């Protein structure tokens, strides 16, 4: 086995439990192990081996099979019940099938036949050290990844809590101010009623904000039916571009498949995307919407399973998205615009993404090579690996 410095270094920090009943072999092998491992716990049979295992848990076990009182396989079986992943190397002069089958069933990592060849034993030790090292590195990576996810989750919650407090405080402050002013205008009912009308509008905004936050917290999709998406898109465009005639081009093939969706929710997504594009262009430029069926594979590195998807691409001719903003596009209360007094700013794209996730789809943002930004909407096509009907 080629020498791996990382494996040797890892082996030098391990504690090895060595169990052997024959004194000469035990002495020679113990010296061999001492030169390679940090600590060696030595036992003469399985009973002593189990006692040492409980008293001072090792990182690795090297054991003979045939021993008095408790043989090596019985000891391994007892150890495996408590430490199923603990590496085990067997040294034995026996090659009988029943011993080998029992050893395999117990998940023994390596066999070294007697008389012990030092190179074979060292190769077995390094193999186990490598597995332990890789396992520890993987566990450390997973822990680091989990910590990062938790930090991102806390950051998102902080953004959401701060945004909610900002919006609700502003709205409630407006209601309180208008109500207080109306009370002082009892002799001027016209102005008083105008102020009360503004409170009613504010309550409507509060209700809408609550609905938006509820959408962000949903974990199950609303009722969905298999239908064509074009009518919903056309209806959304008709409302959103009432004052933007001639600034939209729509390219949809006639054979777009049916997809499962909730019409009110998808209409809201379409409206958000169209309005977002117009705001980005600031009164100039053209919005291009292109539809197609696209096969997604792992190589594309998109946050979706492999399969067929209906893709709608919303391409604007605005300034594009700052690279630092791309990973934050769909986080609640993230916006490239100044917050000012606008309620719910930075929630719209997060809501659109949340709705699409409820539909087993997604939104993906990118800067177009020709300038501007493109938001890609994906919905799974039923009957493919990505879109099994539910």
Image (cartoon, rainbow, N blue to C red):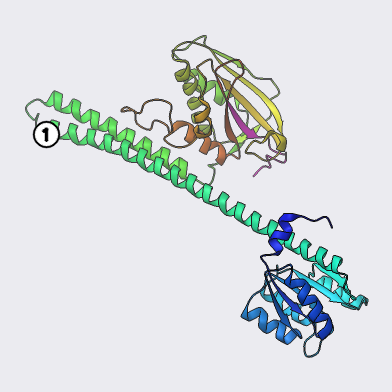
Residue 314: which quarter of the image? top right
Q: Main secondary structure of the magenta part?
A: loop
Residue 7: tell me if it is visible.
Answer: yes
Q: Which residues are magenta?
A: 375-390
Q: 203 or 53: nearer the eye?
A: 53
Local secondary structure at mark 1:
helix
> Which residue: 70% across, 56% down?
134
Provide the residue designation for mark 1.
183
Q: 1 or 279: nearer the eye?
A: 1
Give the residue at the far left of this rendering: 187
Q: 238 or 137: nearer the eye?
A: 137
> Which residue: 40% across, 25% down?
337
Q: 383 or 12: nearer the eye?
A: 12
Q: Position of residue 344 (x, y in %)?
A: 38, 33
Q: Position of residue 387 (x, y in %)?
A: 67, 39
> Which residue: 42% across, 37% down?
212
Q: Is residue 24 left or right of residue 339?
A: right
Q: Taking 230 as reference, is 126 above or below it?
A: below
Residue 48: which quarter of the image? bottom right
Q: Quadrant of the C terminus?
A: top right
Q: Residues within 10 Å of mark 1 (few under 14, many from 20)?
A: some
Give the residue at the far top of this rendering: 246
| Residue 327 among magenta residues | no
Q: Position of residue 219 (x, y in %)?
A: 52, 47
């Amino acid at each position: 086995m080629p020498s791996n410095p990382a494996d040797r270094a890892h082996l030098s920090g391990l504690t090895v439990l060595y169990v052997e009943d024959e004194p000469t072999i035990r002495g020679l092998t113990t010296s061999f192990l001492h030169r390679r491992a940090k600590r060696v716990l030595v036992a003469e049979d399985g009973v002593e081996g189990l006692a040492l295992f409980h008293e001072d848990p090792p990182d690795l076990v090297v054991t003979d099979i045939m021993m008095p009182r408790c043989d090596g396989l019985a000891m391994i079986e007892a150890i495996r019940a408590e430490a199923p992943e603990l590496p085990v190397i067997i040294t034995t002069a026996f090659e009988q099938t029943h011993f080998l089958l029992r050893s395999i069933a117990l998940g023994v990592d390596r066999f070294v036949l007697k008389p012990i060849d030092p190179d074979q034993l060292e190769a077995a030790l390094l193999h186990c050290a490598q597995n332990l090292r890789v396992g520890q590195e993987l566990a450390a990576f997973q822990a680091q990844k989990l910590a990062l996810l938790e930090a991102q989750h806390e950051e998102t919650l902080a953004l959401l809590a701060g945004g909610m407090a900002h919006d609700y405080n502003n709205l409630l402050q407006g209601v309180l101010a208008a109500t207080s002013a109306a009370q002082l205008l009892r002799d001027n009912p016209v102005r008083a009623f105008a102020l009360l009308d503004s409170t009613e509008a504010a309550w409507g905004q509060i209700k809408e904000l609550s609905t938006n936050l509820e959408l962000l917290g949903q974990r199950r999709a609303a009722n969905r039916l298999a239908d064509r998406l074009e009518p919903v898109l056309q209806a959304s465009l008709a409302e959103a571009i009432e004052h933007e005639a001639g600034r939209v081009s729509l390219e949809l093939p006639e054979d777009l498949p049916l997809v499962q969706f909730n019409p009110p929710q998808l209409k809201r997504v379409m409206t958000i995307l169209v309005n977002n594009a117009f705001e980005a262009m600031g009164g100039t430029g053209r919005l291009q919407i292109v539809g197609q069926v696209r096969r997604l594979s792992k190589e594309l590195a998109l946050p979706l399973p492999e399969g067929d998807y209906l893709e709608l691409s919303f391409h604007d001719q605005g300034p594009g998205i700052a690279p630092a903003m791309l990973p934050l596009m769909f986080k609640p209360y993230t916006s490239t615009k100044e917050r000012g007094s606008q309620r719910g700013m930075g929630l719209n794209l997060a809501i659109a993404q949340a709705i699409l996730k409820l539909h087993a789809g997604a939104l993906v943002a990118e800067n177009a090579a020709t300038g501007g930004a493109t938001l890609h909407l994906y919905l799974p096509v039923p009957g493919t690996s990505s879109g099994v009907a539910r």
